[in-house]
Each structure stands twice: as structure tokens, then as C-alpha cells.
Image (tube, grey):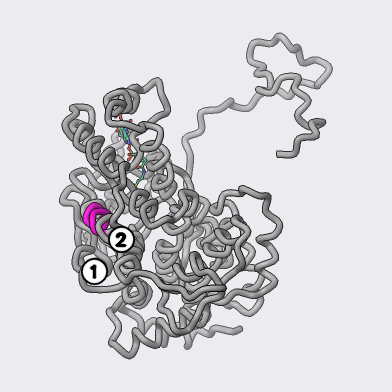
Amino acid sequence: MDFSKNDRQAFEEKYQEIIPTVPKAGKNAKLVLPDGREVDLPIIESANGPNVIDIRSLYQQTGYFTFDPGFFSTASCVSKITYIDGEKGELQYRGYPIEELAEKSNYVEVCYLLIYGILPTKEELVKFEEKIVQEMLVHEKLIEFFKGFKTGAHPMAILTGVFGALSAFMHNDLNIYDPKDRELAAIRIVAKLPTLAAIAFRTANGLPIVYPQKKYGFIENFLYMMFANPTTDWKISSEIVKAIDVICILHADHEQNASTSTVRIAGSSLANPFACIASGITSLWGPAHGGANEACINMLESIGSVDNIAKCIEMAKDKTHNFRLVGFGHRVYKNFDPRATIMQKICHNVINVIGKEEPLLDLALQLEATALRDDYFIQRKLYPNVDFYTGIIYKSIGIPKNMFTVIFAMARSVGWVSQWLEMMSETGIKIGRPRQLYVGHTPREFVPIEKREPEEESRVPPLHGDDDILGSIKLG
Ligand code: CMC
């Protein structure tokens, strides 16, 4: 279990290409404080995209924190994995444009690229895929966990629980300081996710579990475990396999998004990587993030007909509603989401292959056209994002709605773990620990319970009032 200083040195020498280091600062930015003090803050140049002002010493020098809820202007780490130019609509993994990867590569090759930083040779790719497929089996004891969920449980709820439980099976022998152990954990994370996703689907539907097969590749195995009937031969169109493969490439990584940042923060406490990935799955589930694919189909279904598009657009613009046009808008892309452009093409291809009309596609196209003509969306630079079309593709393939985000999680697992690997490869990992702008009470006197008045203005009653929530026999 030991990982010595010499081992570390050897690792650093050999793997310089993938270990990120903070470049030396160049010029300084001057900050003038209200009391007239001047502080020099180093500017660090990026390889591509905006440079950063290094504020790590700001508090020490000035006593001030910075305030940036939602991280609009804050780089939380140094990374060599993914680059996005939101204005130009560019996305690159390790320097390779997403359009080229979607056209010429495949998901397993992209996994290799994200983890190891380079494209594999033919032999390396074959070996890598064999290793992953071999690791797709899960411990039989883990399968018992699935029996504990109530009927109708959302597969994302099941996945967060069961994936976290994987850490119980892979903890004691895992030394997170040893790059070899980390590599094995990474392969296992990518390999186990489709299996657990498929088991979640099958058990929720009373279907027998189907085990992975060596003769199938990674994506085929996922589809096989999802849809095969053990009593008949299984066949799937190569076009559908290709479509899912490309969708997974498009979802594989997206630099410091909410779920990836969650994984990094969890990992920064040196937690078990399987548990860290479970935290990423949780963060992904929300409809503002990966849950948008399911929410988008729900939205399209509830719009129902082109006659209701205008009403829906008005509702999305009305700030008194929580409603947003799902599948529209992005924190980073302010021109177009290059993944959405590719996704729209896949959507048309899949519908052609299946040969069945998909009424939701017409509705989506008209909704998109109406929104793109509307000043509200134009002014705010809101365009369709990757999730606007994914749901329609999945639906036409026959994948149930509640599995959409699960597939996103499966594809993103490699991004999460590559970012975790990258962070763990650095020396002097800092625990993620933001500051806050405190706006609560200053110190006040503790009032003994017998002296507290119910009618005191500052007292806020519990929202449930006198409801007998604890005594209720209906278990939540
Ligand atoms: N519908 C209506 N208004 C919107 C939308 C939308 N989909 N998205 C943003 N806005 C408005 C928002 O109300 C705000 O208006 P104002 O300036 O008047 O207050 C303005 O646009 C800026 O929005 P924001 O909330 O500051 O933007 P953000 O960067 O914090 O949010 C987002 C990004 C993706 C969470 C948001 O656009 C959204 O909620 N979209 C719908 C959900 C969705 O499709 N999510 C999938 C994202 S892509 C998959 C992934 O990688 O996660």
C-alpha cells in the first residue's frame, strides 16, 4: 500500500504530459483598495482562452474575499483535459475538436484519450476495451442492493445509492496515492456504470438481469444488458449502436461543470473515488444539468401541439414562473452548443433508420425556431443545448424517459474520473473549501426557553405548522 517519494518522482517524470501544473505568473494586475492600499495580483496565462488573475494570496494580503456565487468568473483548478470557447461554440478534448472526434473516433477511444491524454494505437485500444469489458461484471452481493428499492424508484436514485455502495467493495485495497490503483479505479468506474445502469432498468421493470459478454464492445454491451431477452437471440442495428456511441462521445467531458466540480470537491477531501463519482451522479440528476434530457421530453409532451408553443415561450419568459425552456441556454455557450448541432443530425439519422415518424421532433424544431426569433432569447444568447435533442433520440430508440439521465451519467463517468485522476496527480492537493459572504446575525444574547415569546416578530413558525408529520403512518 506504500507509495514512496521515489515512486512519485518516477510517476511525475513519466507522465508530465498529463500532470497539470500552474504556469509561472507573468504580469501583475493592480488592485486598489478603498483605504488606498495597492495590491499586485499575478496574472497567469492560459494555453488557450482567458488568462486568470491569481487571487490565492488576496485574503492574506488584504483581508478581503472575492464574491462569485455560481462561479461566473472563477477558475477552480488547473486542467489539461477539456477546452471550451463559449463565444465561438468550440469544444475540444485534449486539443481535438469534438466534431472530429464524433466523426472519426469512438467512445472507448475517447475514454482512452481523456484518461491517458493521447490517442491509443490499434493494439492499445483493443487491450483497453478488453480490460473495460472484463471489468463490466459486478459483485453478486452488489446486485442484492437493487432489491431494496421501492417499485417505481427513479433509476437515478438507484444509481446514486448503488454506485456509492461500490466503494464498500473497493476501498480497503485501494491506495489513492498509487497511480496504478487510481488507473484501475478509473477503468472500473467506466466499466461498472453501464452494468449498474442496465440492472437498475431491468430490476425496476421485473426483467431478468443480463450479464455482459466478451464478444461485444462497450456500447453494444450496454445496449445488450438493457434490451436483450435471454430466451431469444439479440440483434441491434449498427446505426443505433453508432448513434449511442456518438452521443456518449458528446457527453464524455465538459470541463468544470456542476457534476465534475462536485466530483473534484468530494475528491479533494481524499475520499474514495467510487463515492466521489456517486456525488457526481447526484449533481448531474438535476433538470438544470443532466436531468434536462428527461425534463425536455416531459416539457415537449406537455406542450403537446404546435398551437401551444407561443404560450410555452411566454411562460418561459415570465419571471413569476419557475418554468424555463428546457434544453435551452448554457452557462458557457453564448452562440451555439457544438454538441447540439451534432445531436440534431443524429436525431434525423436515427429517425430515418427507425423509419417511424416522431411527432415530438416536429414540435421541437418549431419550438426552437420560435424561440430563436424571440428577442428575449436573442438578447440573453439562449440557444438549444446538448439536451434539446438527446431525449427525442432516446425516445425513438425505445429507451424509457427515466433512463435518459442515467445514460448521460454513463457517458460522463469517464470525464469525472479523468478529472479526478488529474487532480490526484498533482502535488499538494488543496481541499475544496469556498468562503462566504456572511449576512446573518452578529453575536446576540441567548434567551432561555421560558422567556421566549411566541408572538415575537422575528420568530418564524415551522412550515408544517401543527401537522403530525412524525406520527403519520404513510412512510415517505
Ligand atoms: N428559459 C428561459 N430563460 C432562461 C433560460 C431558459 N432555458 N436559461 C436562461 N434563461 C434566462 C434567465 O432567466 C436569465 O434571465 P435574466 O437575465 O432576465 O434574469 C438569463 O437567461 C441568464 O440565465 P442564468 O440563469 O443566469 O444562466 P446560467 O448560466 O446560470 O444557467 C442553465 C445556465 C443551463 C442552468 C440555464 O440556461 C437553464 O436553466 N436552462 C434550462 C435547463 C437546461 O437545458 N439545462 C441543460 C444544460 S446543458 C447540459 C449540461 O451540460 O448540463
Looking at the figure, which quarter contains the N terminus? bottom right
* Residue type indicated by callout 1: Leu
Q: Quadrant of ligand 1?
A: top left
State the residue position of label 2. Answer: 250
Report whether 399 appears left or right of 151.
left
Query: Could you say where residue 34 lies in the image, as x and y percent from the top left?
Result: 31, 31
For the record, the magenta segment spans 343-349
Q: Which residue is mark 1?
A: 101
Left or right of 80: which side holds 45? left
Task: Say which element carries label 1.
Answer: helix
Q: Residue at x 30, y 73 (%)?
A: 106
Lower position in the chain sequence, tag 2 or tag 1: 1
Q: Is residue 66 visible?
A: no
**Residue 132 drawn at (x, y percent):** 46, 79
Foreground: 27 or 216? 216
The secondary structure type at the circle numbered 2 is helix
Mark 1 CB within 8 Å of ligand 1: no
Residue drawn at 41 percent across, 73 percent down: 235
Label placed on residue 399: none
